[in-house]
Image (cartoon, grey):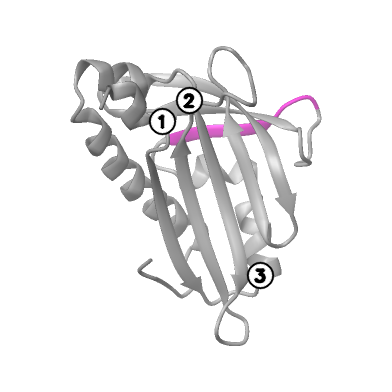
């Protein structure tokens, strides 16, 4: 299998049961400017051009990786169904929404108990050109390392986002 085919479709998924009602958790997962406060990797996020978070709206992000590598990206909201789904794509250099570098998604559903929400947060690498794709061509083991790092950073981001709220990871 080539590095390119291994990267496209590679992903990470976390599932949590959170002691918050869906509407309150929705406010958190759609707080795009908050991502820069919560993530160990994403330093800053901001809506572009007066956007407020509708399908088609864009936001900018700046990420810092190990070794001091910094990248700036533009993302486009692709799905919004309150309070169930919030998804976006990270564009590659082509800027084509249908050929993204990655797809990020939050899915919310009522949990088993009153006031609980089942949360699924996922990342899937798209067909677009990214730093990970370039790195995997040079070192195929880089893909597994990056996915493990993403899983760790996604878990840390969710913990910071939930800031003291009770939750537990649910095995898939």
Q: Secondary structure at mark 3?
A: helix
Report x, y in % for residue 45.
59, 34
Residue shown at 48% from the left, 49% from the top: 122
Frontmost of labels 2 and 3 is 2
- The residue where tag 2 is placed is 127
Say how many tags the image has: 3
Check residue 22 in the rendering and tell me which mark sits there, or answer none.
3
Give the camera-side residue of 45 and 87.
87
Name the magenta segment's main secondary structure: strand
Give the quadrant of the C terminus: bottom left
Marks 1 & 2, CB-CB < 8 Å contact: yes
- Furthest toward the bottom, the residue is 113
48 vs 41, left or right, is right
- The residue where tag 1 is placed is 8
Give whichever of discs 2 and 3 has the lower sequence position: 3
Residue shown at 79% from the left, 24% from the top: 49
Q: Is residue 26 visible?
A: yes
Alpha carbon distance from label 3 to label 1: 31 Å
- Furthest toward the front, the residue is 1
Q: In the displayed structure, would residue 44 be above or below residue 170?
A: above
Q: Which span of residues is magenta-colored?
A: 42-49
Whether the magenta-drawn stretch holds residue 159 is answered as no
* Crowd class of label 3 (few under 14; some 14 to 19; many from 20; radius 10 Å): many
Give whichever of discs 3 and 1 has the lower sequence position: 1
Give whichever of discs 1 and 2 has the lower sequence position: 1
Frontmost of labels 3 and 1 is 1
36 vs 26, left or right, is left
Q: In the displayed structure, would residue 170 be above or below residue 148?
A: below
């Amino acid at each position: 299998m080539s590095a390119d085919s291994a990267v496209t479709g590679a992903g990470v998924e976390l599932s949590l049961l959170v002691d918050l009602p869906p509407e309150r958790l929705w406010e958190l997962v759609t707080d795009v400017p908050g991502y820069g406060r919560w993530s160990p990797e994403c330093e800053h996020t901001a809506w572009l051009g007066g956007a407020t978070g509708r399908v088609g709206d864009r936001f900018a992000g700046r990420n810092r990786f190990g070794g001091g590598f910094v990248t700036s990206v533009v993302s486009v909201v692709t799905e919004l169904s309150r309070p169930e789904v919030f998804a976006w794509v990270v564009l590659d250099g082509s800027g084509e929404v249908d050929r993204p570098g990655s797809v990020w998604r939050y899915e919310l559903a009522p949990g088993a108990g009153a006031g609980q929400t089942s949360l699924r947060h996922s990342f899937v690498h798209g067909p677009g050109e990214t730093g990970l794709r370039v790195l995997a061509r040079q070192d195929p083991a880089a893909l597994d390392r990056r996915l493990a790092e993403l899983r760790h950073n996604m878990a840390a981001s969710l913990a910071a986002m939930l800031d003291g709220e009770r939750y537990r990871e649910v095995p898939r």
